[in-house]
Amino acid sequence: MCGRFAFYSPHEAVVRLFGLPAAPDVEPRWNIAPTQFVATVREAGGPRELSMLYWGLIPSWAKEKAIGARMINARSETLTEKPSFRNAFRRRRCLILADGYYEWQRSGVAKQPYFISFADGQPFGMAGLWERWRDPATGEPLESCCIVTTAPSPAVAQVHDRMPVIVAPGDYAEWLDPRNEDTGRLARLLGPTALPGLGARPVSRRVNDARNQGPELIERVDTDGTDTLS
């Protein structure tokens, strides 16, 4: 699964890479956690746009918001089978913007966090699904999203057995087009790939606490026991 990630790229790089006509500035964050709002790119009946969506997909039929905390990821292999994701896969897809994501590998009695990113530092778009939900009690609307996961790229398979689907820039238009309901073709964009340049480095256990922020969270640390922060 993917339970934490970072997004801190400059505004100009985001506009250029994701083909946005314009976009609001997004506050850099190095420890994004579920149930927070995350930066996404989507085409929702108009030009491509950057939107802040609640991380934890809440199906339109859900009775309460709390279900979103359990719906942060969706397995690519079962998108057409699960009622929670089936319609969003057909019609409401997005890119969730990241510079890297975290995974944890068990090391003795503890789990060592790793930051997984591209060597050139480029941001990337993780395949996402989004939904609109209205609170039955208050009538307040909420738009939410989840990250689609797949089998890992060989470069990071030693860290975890799942990873987010990283959509190639050449596939952005096909993935985002809300008129494209060919789920068979879309599924071919979701398989594991080699992803040249993707790599993992051990980082501080301070990332375990979602309240911690700052670029020091993504800096490499030793894994010989010297990093004892938690």
Image (spheres, helix red, strand yellow):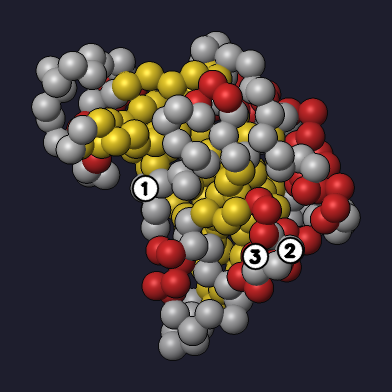
Tell me, yes or no, if residue 139 can be seen here.
yes
First-in-chain label (1 vs 3): 1
Task: Identify the mark nearer the N-term, 1 or 2.
Answer: 1
Q: How many angstroms separate mark 1 from mark 2 (CA)?
A: 26 Å
Residue 85's disc number? 3
* Residue 92 visible somewhere in the drawing: no
Question: Is disc 1 in contact with disc 2, using a CB cutoff of under 8 Å?
Answer: no
Choose mark 1 or mark 3, whichever is in front: 3
Which residue: 55% across, 11% down? 120
Number of the label disc, if any, that sits on residue 33: 1
Position of residue 213 relative to residue 71, above or below, is: above
Left/right placement of residue 216 relative to residue 132 reads left
Where does residue 71 sit, x and y in percent of width and height? 49, 62
Residue assigned mark 2? 80
- Point out the residue furthest to the top here: 120
Residue at screen point 71% across, 39% down: 191
Mark 2 or 3: in front is: 2
